[in-house]
Image (tube, rainbow, N blue to C red):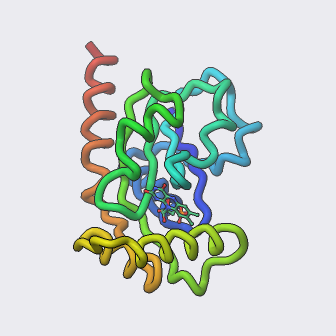
Amino acid sequence: MIIVYESKTGFTKKYAEMLAAKTKLEVFRVDEISKISQDEEIIFLGWMKVGKIQGLNKLRNYNVKVVCGSGTGQTAEPDTETVIARNKIEDIPFFYLRGGCLPLKEIKGMDRILLSIFVKMLKSSKDRDEKTEEAISIIENGFNGVKEENLVPVLDFLNGKAKENSL
Ligand SMILES: Cc1cc2nc3c(=O)[nH]c(=O)nc-3n(C[C@H](O)[C@H](O)[C@H](O)COP(=O)(O)O)c2cc1C
């Protein structure tokens, strides 16, 4: 089993490296996929963009056993069920990892345009609840939610799988 990841600003990469340190599994970027045999079991970690797990499509013909998506919310956004359906991973265990984001002014290109539109939408919403305020602040000021403890459910799952295999 190996770890493969896709990360744009480094938060998902950090999780992939933490997971590699904990499990002693080898870690690859998704653009190194040609080095990997199609039979190899893969734990995939990708950042999420409008509910799509980035990089996952490049692994459609590979043996992906676990998928982790990183986003900035406390939970997967729009919600776990939508993420699973939108990424067609109904038959693969999915784990959400809270990642982070750079301050808006440090983000470039199309992503900055998309996030700017999103912030405007949030700011103009009629009932700006706590969650909305948090989302606005996270996008404008940046946020780092990467924590080792967030990997515990993934590690527990992998340990369970390892036990199953040794029975
Ligand atoms: C344009 C854009 C769209 C995003 N859409 C989502 C989303 O739909 N759901 C979510 O949870 N996070 C979303 N995010 C947040 C990123 O997935 C999050 O910041 C992630 O941890 C970044 O990982 P990276 O540093 O590895 O690139 C979005 C970020 C950008 C820039």
Residue 144 percent across, percent down from the top left: 39, 74
Q: Is residue 158 visible?
A: yes
Residue placed most toward the observer, 146 or 101: 101
Residue under the point 43% across and 25% down:
90
Q: Report the side of 16 relative to 125 (left or right).
A: right
Residue 156 percent across, percent down from the top left: 25, 38
Residue under the point 29% across and 34% down:
157
Count of marks placed on residues: 0
Residue under the point 57% across and 24% down:
63
Residue placed most toward the observer, 21 or 70: 70
Q: Is residue 144 visible?
A: no
Residue 9 percent across, percent down from the top left: 58, 69
Residue under the point 59% across and 26% down:
40
Residue 165 percent across, percent down from the top left: 34, 17
Residue placed most toward the observer, 74 or 145: 74
Question: In the current view of this chain or complex, which residue is farthest to the right?
Answer: 34
Tell me which corner region of the image, top left, top right, bottom left or bottom right, holds residue 117. Answer: bottom right
Task: Give above or below for 60 relative to 115.
Answer: above
Task: Give above or below for 40 relative to 2.
Answer: above
